[in-house]
Image (tube, coloured by chain):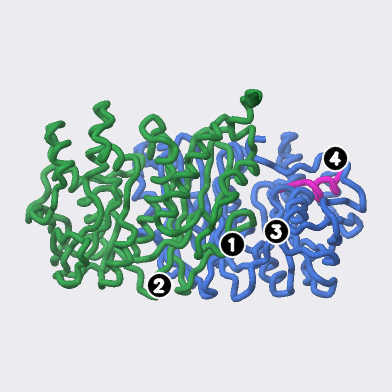
Chain colours: A green, B blue
Amino acid sequence: MRPEPPRDAETVAGLGEFGLIRRVTEGRAQPPPTLLGPGDDAAVVAAADGRVVASTDVLVEGVHFRLDWSNPEQVGRKAVAVNLADIVAMGAVPTGVLVGLACPGDTRVELADGLFAGMWQEAANAGIGVVGGDMVTSETLVISVTALGDLEGRAPVTRSGARPGDVLAYAGRLGWAAAGLAVLGRGFRSPVAVVGAQRVPEPPYAAGPQAARAGATAMLDVSDGLLADLGHMAAASEVAINVRTEGFEVHQRLLDVASALGADPLHWMLTGGEDHALVAAFPTPGQVPDDWHPIGWVGKGSGVTVDGRPYEGPTNGWEHWR
Amino acid sequence: MRPEPPRDAETVAGLGEFGLIRRVTEGRAQPPPTLLGPGDDAAVVAAADGRVVASTDVLVEGVHFRLDWSNPEQVGRKAVAVNLADIVAMGAVPTGVLVGLACPGDTRVELADGLFAGMWQEAANAGIGVVGGDMVTSETLVISVTALGDLEGRAPVTRSGARPGDVLAYAGRLGWAAAGLAVLGRGFRSPVAVVGAQRVPEPPYAAGPQAARAGATAMLDVSDGLLADLGHMAAASEVAINVRTEGFEVHQRLLDVASALGADPLHWMLTGGEDHALVAAFPTPGQVPDDWHPIGWVGKGSGVTVDGRPYEGPTNGWEHWR
């Protein structure tokens, strides 16, 4: 029988920086956009368009994720997903991610294994690889992810292009993560669908480039809450935005959870963050792709209204240190 | 007279995430490679070559820098410099950096101001801008930097291309940061030149693309120590590398500090990290650019020798958790 491995070998300190890098990169197949993967001073990624889209997100244990609520794979998937959502929200196609991991020396190797398994899995969902990164020691577990993307010859779809008369639509999920958070906050672990949505967002990666090809004038991903993020779009575009709740398709699961908790599912959809749905403006209703749900209009003025009135309820999105 | 501002306004928590982002980005002029700067879901950076070089570094307070040894500007400069060194070590020209900042809510705004002033200054030294980033709350101060670069139509210069017969040369400083560390470790604050080198490396940004244009077969930046990093090049290239110490020009400042501390300046040059000099292999002596110092040869076999013999002394580079 094999001897019990020394405890040291079960921690990242036992494995060492270079051992850990080898462990999470070796044997991984890199998809076509990765021209040079991990192991050198820097990675090389395809940028056929002649421009590259880039976004960085930093996730901190206890702030952005809890390891008593999520397993390491889920945290890894979430770290990559929230960042890729920013790339597709520009109308770009993801091409690669770089990962920085800061963690204590007594972090168990299986936690790092799980994090990277999740990051590779989510990257694969978008057709890309983990192309490079850095691993360092830190008292706090911090994950930084930088995603790259390609615009395929199109103009980037910014937040500032919405024009009066545009129709507003979203793709992906709204309110699911908020419902999951409400469930977890009361100590429940089910229903699995909404709890899973809180642990791992599922941004609609294909919908971003799809909207850009369809002529979207403005787009962003809903990280802080629909109304909060539409506030950013309205301000950047110098327009007013009105959301019509009759356009919302409230999923039966949200209705069920809301009923059980005595909550309003529409409130979750309007103010819940972390689902990373995409919301975009299109010049005409006919340009809204099939997978997108029309939910409002862009007008002259400023600010965001719901069914023509200011929303009654807390709409502030998440802001760090606030 | 103006009233004393409330204490709250002096911290990043008082300013808030969005206020801090505005504070460190507004009014900054972006250089030509920045096609879309901070403020949207992602940045857009020129990648004329059709490929993009990318590298991430994570710096942790107490591990990579100490705010009792360095001021915030110096930390900001260092964070960008160590990352840009990776880009130029591929033979690429820097095009932009993204910054992730994780810090406690009671972090003073002037610290964040200083960090970003340093990051912008070092980026400007390389002709680029801070194009995007993320700011989050964390108990530990962690800075993640991702740099992007353009290969200008050349093949990337990796670690694995050195061939027997190549001449080895370096550009930049060797041993200065180690000398500075020795000085600081004994409680001194001078001489300023070596202490400054420990606080802020000065990688020779132009020398990387210069070496690539001259036909360098392999290149890396010296982050862990010359012998340790040459070990990485020898292993990746499957060659032996011999360093000839008679090729070293030991700067008078290093001689002076070494004499005062009873240390060996050559040991600092061979094993000291953090200066981010570039070391490269060239097919012929005639291809070594003027700014580069020939210091050895590439041969058949494996491993790194000094003057034909194994180096007597500790040569291991820095490895996290070890």
For numbered disc 4, what is the local secondary structure? loop
Q: Gap in Å between the C-alphas at discs 1 and 2?
A: 21 Å
Residue corresponding to mark 2 = A152
What type is the residue that disc 1 sits on? Leu
What type is the residue that disc 2 sits on? Glu
Residue A186 vs residue B77, the one in the foreground: A186
Q: Is residue B68 left or right of residue B22?
A: right
Residue A93 vs residue A232, the one in the foreground: A93
Image quadrant containing the C terminus of chain B = top right
Question: Chain ID for label 2?
Answer: A
Residue A271 % position (x, y): 20, 46
Q: Residues within 10 Å of mark 3 (few under 14, many from 20)?
A: many
Q: Are marks 4 and 2 on the same chain?
A: no
Q: Is residue B212 left or right of residue A75?
A: right
Residue A130 vs residue A167, the one in the foreground: A130
Q: Are marks 3 and 1 on the same chain?
A: no
Residue corresponding to mark 3 = B220
Q: Which mark is residue A36?
A: 1
Q: Are marks 4 and 3 on the same chain?
A: yes
What type is the residue that disc 3 sits on? Leu
For numbered disc 3, what is the local secondary structure? strand
Q: What residue is shown at x 12% (from left), y 35% (from top)?
A: A259
Q: Gap in Å between the C-alphas at discs 3 and 2?
A: 32 Å
Q: What residue is shown at x 83% (from left), y 51% (from top)?
A: B304
For numbered disc 1, what is the local secondary structure? strand
Residue A96 % position (x, y): 48, 59
